[in-house]
């Protein structure tokens, strides 16, 4: 029955706990897609080596991410959840794709140039070929759609190029994958001080994580940046205020959102009250996710089972692709 469903794949690096941006920007989307497509979602632990050489926290981070993904809506019976490093077929495909990737295009990649600026002391070759490994992640399952944020679109474009080059040289093996999101879910979750997006590893007090406790959620929201309030009716909201309204729109009722919109537009808003309300509704939203994740975390056998089953399913698909790839390339001497 699954045979004719289109294939969806996405991954997340185990470099920090999940926050609201990950939830509303990715996870919610994934959870919806698992009902309509054959989905593969994985922890990109090899990719994290390009920036985080210290692997001591990798195991616990990977396992807590799996718990959070499931607590946030992924169902291991509906989709395949696995760790990238459990799939040895990926690096073999990465090797073949590396021969089709040019130094010039890799050096021009925006994420590579950013990393060169951020970590000039560690510009390793893995960083340069990061998009090739990502292409291998995607193509190993012959995925059709890759739900990712804007910052990843260039990598998907590169994957498309590598797939086309391979198909052109060796035969049509790969569908050419597309970046995809349900557009109505593409909300931008701003950091609580309004300076850019919420981030996994930076600015922890301005980011709300799915594992923050009630007290911490309240504390973060109450100290979020606001101001005196508007003096002109129907003013445009500053970014940091819009960020709070966006959150209210996601976790509070429609009536509450309307009330504070009205107060803002009539210059009578009390941000203290609005933040109290937001904190209350945010706690109601996060608490069950946090508790489900904690319950799973305390059941290591269950996490083992999920990762084992995920790896088995993922390897089955990966092996089938690699066999076709080896045939196409001519690496079959027996
Ligand atoms: N590069 C992605 C990120 O930083 C993670 C990732 C690795 C990925 N491989 C992937 C995403 C394959 C989608 C498909 O967010």
Image (cartoon, rainbow, N blue to C red):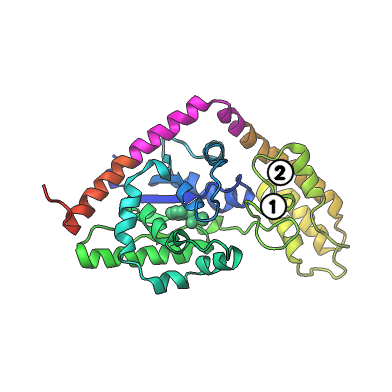
Establish if 212 lies above or below 255. above
In the rendered image, residue 44, in percent from the top left (x then y), is placed at 47, 48
- Kindly give the residue lying farthest to the left in the view shown: 334
Q: Is residue 298 left or right of residue 84?
A: right
Observer-nearest residue: 144 or 172? Answer: 172
**Which image quarter: residue 129?**
bottom left
Q: Which residue is mark 1?
A: 247
Q: Secondary structure at mark 1?
A: helix
Q: Is residue 109 left or right of residue 68?
A: left
In the rendered image, residue 280, in percent from the top left (x then y), is placed at 76, 41
Establish if 59 lies above or below 90. above
In the rendered image, residue 190, in percent from the top left (x then y), is placed at 68, 58
**Which image quarter: residue 40?**
top left
Observer-nearest residue: 93 or 200? Answer: 93
Q: Are marks 2 and 1 in contact (CB under 8 Å)?
A: yes
Indicate yes or no whether the magenta region holds residue 242: no
Residue 282 tag number: 2
**Which mark is first along the chain, 1 or 2?**
1
State the extent of the magenta-drawn residues as a range. 292-314
The residue positioned 62% from the left and 51% from the top of the image is 200
The residue positioned 85% from the left and 57% from the top of the image is 269
């Amino acid at each position: 029955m699954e045979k004719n469903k289109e294939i969806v794949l996405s991954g997340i690096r185990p470099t920090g706990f999940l926050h609201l941006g990950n939830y509303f920007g990715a996870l919610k989307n994934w959870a919806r897609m698992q009902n309509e497509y054959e989905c593969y979602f994985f922890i990109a632990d090899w990719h994290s080596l390009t920036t985080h050489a210290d692997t001591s926290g990798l195991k616990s981070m990977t396992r807590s991410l799996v718990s959070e993904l499931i607590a946030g809506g992924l169902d291991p019976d509906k989709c395949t959840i696995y760790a990238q490093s459990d799939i040895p077929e990926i690096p073999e495909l990465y090797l073949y794709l590396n021969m089709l990737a040019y130094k010039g295009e890799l050096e021009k990649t925006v994420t590579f140039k950013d990393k060169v600026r951020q970590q000039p002391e560690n510009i390793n070759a893995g960083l340069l070929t990061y998009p090739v490994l990502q292409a291998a992640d995607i193509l190993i399952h012959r995925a059709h759609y890759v739900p990712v944020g804007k910052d990843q679109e260039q990598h998907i474009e590169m994957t498309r190029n590598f797939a086309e080059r391979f198909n052109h040289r060796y035969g049509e093996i790969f569908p050419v994958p597309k970046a995809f999101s349900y557009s109505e879910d593409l909300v931008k979750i701003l950091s609580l001080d309004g300076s850019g997006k919420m981030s996994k590893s930076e600015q922890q007090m301005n980011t709300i994580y799915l594992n923050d406790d009630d007290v911490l959620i309240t504390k973060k929201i109450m100290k979020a940046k606001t101001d005196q309030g508007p003096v002109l009716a129907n003013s445009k909201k500053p970014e940091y205020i819009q960020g709070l309204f966006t959150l209210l729109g996601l976790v509070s009722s429609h009536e509450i959102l309307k009330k504070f919109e009205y107060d803002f537009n009539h210059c009578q808003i009390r941000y203290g009250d609005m933040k109290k309300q937001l904190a209350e509704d945010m706690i109601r939203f996060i608490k069950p996710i946090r508790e489900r994740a904690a319950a799973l975390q305390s059941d290591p056998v269950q996490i083992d089972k999920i990762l084992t089953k995920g790896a088995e399913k993922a390897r089955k698909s990966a092996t089938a692709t690699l066999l076709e790839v080896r045939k196409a390339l001519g690496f079959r001497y027996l």
